[in-house]
Amino acid sequence: MDLLLKTNGFFISKKEDRFRVELEKDGKIIKTDIPATKIERIILSNNGTITTGAISLAIENNIPIIFLKWEEPTGMIWHCRIGKTAKTRRSQLKFSESINGIRFASNWIKQKMGNQLNYLKDLKKNHNHKGDFDTVIKNINNYIMELTQYTNNIDDKLPHREIKDTIIGIEGIASKYYFEGINHALPKNYKFKERSRRPARDKFNALLNYGYGMLYPMVEKCLIVAGLDPYVGFIHADNYNKTTLVYDVIEMYRAHIDRGVVNFINSKKVKGSHFNILENGISLSDDGKGEFAPYIKDIVFGKEFYFKNKKYLLPDFIQKECYEIAKSIRGKIL
Amino acid sequence: MDLLLKTNGFFISKKEDRFRVELEKDGKIIKTDIPATKIERIILSNNGTITTGAISLAIENNIPIIFLKWEEPTGMIWHCRIGKTAKTRRSQLKFSESINGIRFASNWIKQKMGNQLNYLKDLKKNHNHKGDFDTVIKNINNYIMELTQYTNNIDDKLPHREIKDTIIGIEGIASKYYFEGINHALPKNYKFKERSRRPARDKFNALLNYGYGMLYPMVEKCLIVAGLDPYVGFIHADNYNKTTLVYDVIEMYRAHIDRGVVNFINSKKVKGSHFNILENGISLSDDGKGEFAPYIKDIVFGKEFYFKNKKYLLPDFIQKECYEIAKSIRGKIL
C-alpha cells in the first residue's frame, strides 16, 4: 500500500521496524503504527515533519518517499543502494534509446488513435450530429493500420529521430481528421478551423488547452510516483529540460478531455464571460476557469475505468497504468 | 558550502528562504538561520528531524539532501525537476558506455600506476631497503607507457569488454611488479608471495585488505555526495548490484593505504596477537583492528594533499576530486 499523507502537521517517526504516523484530529493526536513491510511508497503532500530514523527505515526497506506540493511532484528520496527506482530509471534511459523502446512507446500513440476512433464512433451514433463521420472514421482506421505496418517493419538503420518523426507525422494527419470529426459535433459558433495552442485562436481550443493543462501535472505525478523519469521520453523530441515522457504518455488520455470539452460546450454551460479576448487569440477568463475546472474534475476525472477487472477513477487509473509501464520498462533491459 | 549535521537531535525547518537549524547544546537550543542560496548540499548523519517545508526549500533551490548512517551513505533526495544530480547521473550512464568514457576512466588507472611508481621511488631513496628497485621501477614505467599508447589508439570496433579487460590486464601486470617492489621494503617475516584477498594468506595482505576496506566506504560516500551513481562504473566489470564506480575510482587512492601498511609494519607496532589464523588464511584480530584502524585514521586519513593550491585532509581531498569527476562527466554528454 501507499502511505499518502495529505493533512498538514503530520509527524512520521520510526518505532522499531514500523512507521509511526501522528496526526492531529479535533485537537487530539492520533497515532498509527504501520509495519515497513506493508508500505510500497510514502507520498507526502502538504506540511509535516519526518525524522531521519523514519527516512532510514524507508531507505532500508527500499520504500521511495515522494514529496508533492499542491499535488505536483517536487522531489523524491532515492536509494543510493540499487533499488527499484534506480533500476527503473536506468532501464528507461537505455530502453528509450533503442528501436524496441520506440516500438514500445508507439503503442501509446496507437492507443491514442484508437481512443479517437472510439469517440468518433460514439459521436456518429448520436443522431444530433449530422456531419460526415464515416469518412473521418475510415481515414483514422487507415492511419492506425499504416502506423501498425510502419512500426512492425521499422528499418532500424534509419536515424531514430527520423523514425520518431514518421510516427508523430502519421499520428498528426490522423489527428487532423479526428478534429474535423469533432468539429461536426460542435454548435455553429464553437466550430474551429484547426488546433491552435499558444494562444488558442478560438473558444474550443481555449477550453481544450486548459483541459490538457489540467491533465498534464496529473500524468507527470503518476510517472514520478511510479519511479519513471518524466524527462526521458521515447517518441517526443529529446529536448533538454522538457518532460518528454509526459508528452508521450499523456497521448493515451487526451480523448477524455476532448470528450469533456465537447460535452461542456453542448451542455450549454459556456458563456461569453468565460473567455478573454487577447490581441492574438482567446483564453479562459477567471470566470471560465471557475466553471470549467470543476466540470472537468467532476465529469472527466470522476469517470471510472477498468484496470485488471477493477474500477478506478481516472487519476487512479492513470497511476495504475504508469506503474504497469514502469514494470514493463524494468523488465526490458538490465 | 555543505550543511553537514552530525549531532543527534537536530531539527531543520524552513524560515522564509532560509533553513533554520536547531541544535541542543548544554541543555540549550541553539538556532541558526542559513540562507538557502548559500548551501550546496545538506548532509545528514545521525538522528534528527526535518520538516517537509525545509525539504521543499532544498528542492526548489536544487540542493540535494544526503542521508548517512554510520558515515555511510544510505539515501538521497533527488529532484524530479531536472537538476545537477539528474544531469550528472544521466551523463554518467551514457558516458560510461562510450569509448571516450573508457578513455576518461583509464586516466584513473594511469594515476594509480603513477602513484605506485612514486612510492617505489621513495622506497628506493630509503637506504634501509636493499632490494632491486630499479628493475621494478623500469617495468612499471614501461607499462604506464604501454597503457598510454593503448588508450591513445583504442580500436573502437572492439567490444568494450575486451578493451576494458586489456586495460585491467596491463594494470594487473604492473601491479605484480609493484608489489614485488613493496616486498623489498618489508622485514623478513612480513614478506608475502602475492596479493591475496578472501582470505588473506599472510599478515601483509591481511593488513592491506583491512586498510582498503576502510577506504572503500569513504570513496563511495564521496561519489554519492558528488551526485555520481556508485553502481555505474567505467572500467571494472559491469556487475549488477556491484558498486563498480567505487572500484574504478578507489584505484587512485590505494597507494596511500599501501604506504600506511608498510609504515605500520616497519614502525614495529605489529604483534602476533593482532592476527587470527584461519583455516585457510589470516585475518586481523580485534586487537589488531584496535591498533591498525586508528593508525590509518591518524596517519593516512590525516595526511594533507593539494587540490587547486589548497591543502586538504585525504577524505576531503577525495571529496574534492569526486566533485571534479562529476563536473567533468556532466560536461561530456547531454
Image (spheres, coloured by chain):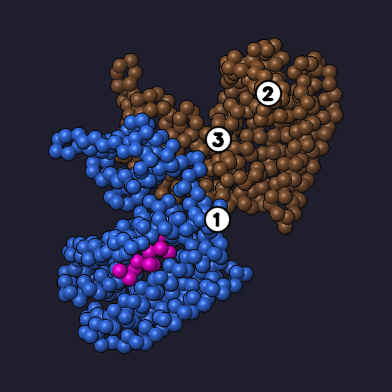
Chain colours: A blue, B brown
Residue A333 shows which numbered tag? 1
Kind of residue at disc 2: Glu
The reply to whether residue B16 is visible in this rendering is: no
Which is closer to the viewer, label 3 or label 2?
2
Residue at numbered disc 3: B220
Which residue matches tag 2?
Answer: B279
Image coords of residue B60 (percent x, y): 37, 44
Q: Chain of mark 3?
A: B
Question: Does the stretch in magenta take in A37?
Answer: no
x, y percent for residue A53: 37, 31
> Element under label 2?
loop
- Viewed as shown, does residue B115 lie left or right of A82? right
Cβ–Cβ under 8 Å for marks 2 and 1 = no
Up the image or down, A3 lies above or below A94; here it is above
Looking at this view, is B136 or A79 the one in front? A79
Q: Are marks 1 and 3 in contact (CB under 8 Å)?
A: no
Marks 3/2 same chain: yes
* Res B322 quadrant in image: top right
Compared across the picture, whether B16 is left or right of A239 comes to left
